Amino acid sequence: MKYLVWFMAGILIVAGLLCLSIAPTVMAGYPIWVMIHSFVTVCFWTVVPIATIGLLYFLLTRKKEIR
């Protein structure tokens, strides 16, 4: 059940990111490749802070374990 919940949360996050990138693209009337570029940019700026915080957390908790 736990994996199903994580899967559903991931699907909702991806759907939200798609809506975030599709709405301005469709409203402005740009071609589809602009929407894809916008989606990749939004994903990049979403993943970078999460990965940075996760890496810092991992390094700090590992440092405590070594002591």
Image (spheres, rainbow, N blue to C red):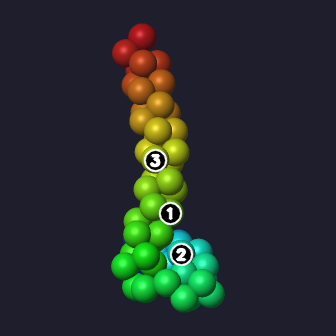
Say which residue appears at 50% left-offset and 78% top-offset: 18
Q: Which circle's residue, 1 or 2, is located before the other in the chain?
A: 2
- Please provide percent x and percent y for residue 24: 60, 79
37 sits to left or right of 57: left
Under mark 3, the amino acid is Val
Residues tagged 1 and 3 counted as in contact (Cβ below 8 A): no
The relative height of residue 64 versus residue 37 in the rendered view (above or below) is above
Q: Is residue 45 above or below residue 2?
A: above
Residue located 46% across and 19% down the image: 64
* Mark 2 Cα-neighbour bin, 10 Å: few <14, some 14–19, many ≥20: many
> Which residue is the site of mark 1?
42
Q: Is residue 16 visible?
A: no
Query: Residue 18: in sight, yes or no?
Result: yes
Residue assigned mark 3 = 48
| Mark 1 and mark 3: Cα distance apart in space | 10 Å
- Indicate which disc residue 15 carries: none
**Cβ atoms at labels 1 and 2 below 8 Å apart:** yes
Marks 1 and 2 sit apart, C-alpha to C-alpha, by 7 Å
In this rendering, the count of numbered labels is: 3
Q: In terms of secondary structure, where does tag 1 sit?
A: helix
Kindly identify the residue that appears in the image at 45 percent across and 61 percent down. Answer: 41
Query: Does 66 sit left or right of 5 as displayed?
Result: left
Earlier-in-chain disc, 1 versus 3: 1
Q: Give me the disc on residue 21.
A: 2
